[in-house]
Amino acid sequence: MIAGKRIGLTPDDDTRAKLIRLAIACGKHPTTMALDLVRLCVNTPNIIDHVQRIHGAEERYRVRYRVEGKAVIYE
């Protein structure tokens, strides 16, 4: 398991420009917007499944989850 709390992101120019534009539209700082998007992705079952499928996640490492109410719980 990876320890620590910092995760550095270095988006390409196109992704950075889109992030900044979306952040401005939403009245947020780009870093805050990026964190919001990461939270959305790791807590949305369809996105979790899609990302694992497009990256060919090995079955033994696939993220298993269950949905309890509005919460997504990783198992």
Image (tube, grey):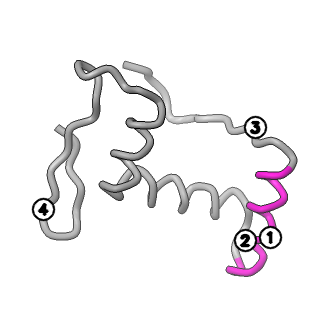
Q: Examine the structure image and report whether residue 17 is included in the region drawn in magenta.
A: yes
Query: For mark 2, what is the residue?
Result: 22
Q: Quadrant of the N terminus?
A: top left
Instruction: Tell me what residue is drawn at x 45 percent, y 54 percent.
Output: 41
Circle 2 SS class: helix
Q: CA distance from mark 4 to mark 1?
A: 34 Å
Q: CA distance from mark 3 to mark 1?
A: 16 Å
- What percent of the width, then of the height, locates residue 25? 74, 80
**To which quarter of the image does residue 68 belong?**
bottom left
Local crowd at mark 2 within 10 Å, few (<14), some, or many (≥20)? Answer: some
Query: For mark 3, what is the residue?
Result: 10
Query: For mark 1, what is the residue?
Result: 21
Instruction: Tell me what residue is drawn at x 40 percent, y 46 percent.
Output: 50
Q: Amino acid at mark 3?
A: Thr
Q: Amino acid at mark 2?
A: Leu
Ranked by sequence position, the earlier of labels 4 and 3 is: 3
Q: Quadrant of the C terminus?
A: top left
Q: CA distance from mark 2 to mark 1?
A: 4 Å
Circle 1 SS class: helix
Instruction: Tell me what residue is drawn at x 43 percent, y 21 percent.
Output: 2
Mark 2 near mark 1, Cβ–Cβ under 8 Å?
Answer: yes
Mark 2 near mark 3, Cβ–Cβ under 8 Å?
Answer: no
Residue extent of the magenta highlight: 14-27
- What percent of the width, then of the height, locates residue 43? 35, 56
Q: CA distance from mark 4 to mark 3?
A: 33 Å
Circle 3 SS class: loop
- What percent of the width, then of the height, locates residue 34? 63, 56
